[in-house]
Image (spheres, grey):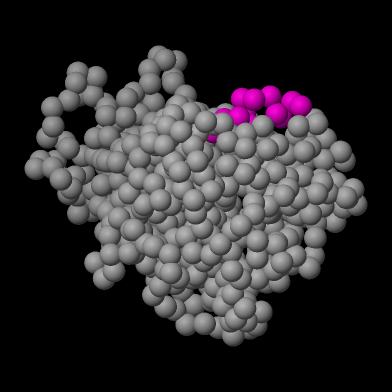
Amino acid sequence: MSNHRSGGVQDRLVAPTSPGFRSSRRAAAASPPPPPPPKEPRGRRGGDDGRRKLSGLAWTSIALTGLMVAGSLTGYTFYRSALAGVGVTTPDDKIRNPRPANLTGALNVLIVGSDTRHGEGNARYGQADSRIDSGKRTDTMILMHISPARDKAQLISFPRDSMVDIPQCEAEGSKQVLPPMRGMINSAYNRGGIACTITTIETLTDIRIHHNVEVDFNGFKAIVDALDGIEVCLANPVDDKKSKLKLPRGRSTLNGEQALGYVRLRAYGNHSDLERIKRQQLFASQVVKKITEGGILSDPTALLGLIRAASSSVTMDEKLAGNPDKLLEVAQSARSLTASKVQFYTVPVLPDPADSNRVVWDPARAPKLFEAIKNDTALPEPAPTAKKFVPKVEQVKIQVINGTTTAGKAGEVAQQLAELGFDVVGTGNALTAEGTSQPKTLLLYGKRDTTGPDYASVLASKLSGTKRPSTKGKVKVTNPQPFTAAGTTQSVADKGTDKGAEKAPVIQLLIGDDFTGVRTEIPESIKETGISADTKNICA
């Protein structure tokens, strides 16, 4: 794993007026004077003291972003004034590359923290770089994925030391098109700002990003103090002069000053970036838990103070900040979330063979995480027939038929369905009479299969996109083949099945041009490393 030390670009907090970060436009609203900023810690120095603060600070600001939006609609007029400090950006104007489609109805928000060192407020957190071309980077990139039903959220962290292929981008502040390059993922922000970061994430994951939130952290301590502190638990005592943090082993409730030291703490554990991300996720989980379970949403005074603290640290895209209907949608989502339905994950990585201080995304597990997010869908549970029979996934027999001109499509989908537990018995092809692709994806069962709709509805619930009804009658298949799932020695059809499955009809999945994918699951190996916001505050 990466154990990257300081010595490169140092992280700095961003003043609300720092050039290159906030747009001159603001969310329109008359605002009372904001509360004065909290006193900053004295005696800050450069080096590791200022190194990598942004990751931890962003986690807390991210956890509060949904709350801020939610509160803005709880009493729209009352809270709107608190949002006057929110900055506005228009990244869509600079995105040139083709963008992925969103076919599930999910909402994806990319949240980043800037490490620019320009601006008066930033100088307090380390030596500012006077070079005009020193640029800015983002030490934190998190994709907040809100499910189509708006009842759960998954936050995916992209380690900043990841070496990736950055696509062509338009330079920030000009129309110059920059060529593709290989580099650390956070350098995309330096090349083309938030627009290039969005382009990079979309190209690498094939996930459509609908909105973005940029975070600076001058209000971080005020946010933590507005929550009356956050409890953490340490497996070992800490006495670190660089982060100015001294805490005993066990549980402590941190005020804003202490929290600032905790989230930038480096001289602890194995000093790795990934270990620190895990601690920061635990910290953020406690923030979410306190917000969702601590009565803040029902306390107008506490909520208003928290919104003001959070809004001083946020810049949104214009489509979100200036759209009351979209704000209302996100607000309703945030209010319906519970701590148990907020999950934190990190993109799985491997050491970079070319540089031990860098990482590369795990080619086996990372794509499955992205597929699970991209194809997430919330469909109702299969509706049983009059017999009240709901088949289990493993009882559903499927023949996957490629009705498109894309070679290998049936085998690819068959493997995905087999990994979900379906009994895939074979594959085949079925183009139109003219030799062209079938326009629509169909779920077919035999004319005499009275329970066909029951079995087909289970399959339908695992396909992304809109709900697909089943149809009586099957198609003639050319080149039928038995299916053998990867990693097995015999076809699924040859496995022993229970008595109920023996009589199950075979459902034909005819893949057409409108097919949007299988609703894949996040691999268990990734789930095991994730954190739920209702996770017990373990000592780390």
Which residue occupies the extreme left position in the image? 489
Q: On screen, 293 above or below 221?
A: above
Residue 419 visible in the displayed image: yes
Q: What secondary structure prevails in the magenta region?
A: helix
Q: Where is residue 365 in the image (x, y as percent from the top left)?
A: 30, 50
Work out whether residue 75 or residue 537 is closer to the camera in this orientation and state it.
537
Residue 4 included in the magenta stretch of the image: no
Q: Which residue does the image show at 62% across and 78% down from the upper left? A: 130
Q: Which residue does the image show at 83% across and 35% down from the upper left? A: 75
Res 438 quadrant in image = bottom left
Q: On screen, 226 above or below 435?
A: above
Q: Is residue 518 left or right of residue 245?
A: left
* Count of numbered marks: 0
Work out whether residue 167 or residue 173 is closer to the camera in this orientation and state it.
173
Magenta segment = 286-299
Q: In this view, does 224 lie to the left or right of 483?
A: right
Q: Which residue does the image show at 47% across and 82% down from the upper left? A: 179
Q: Which residue does the image show at 78% across and 68% down from the upper left? A: 24
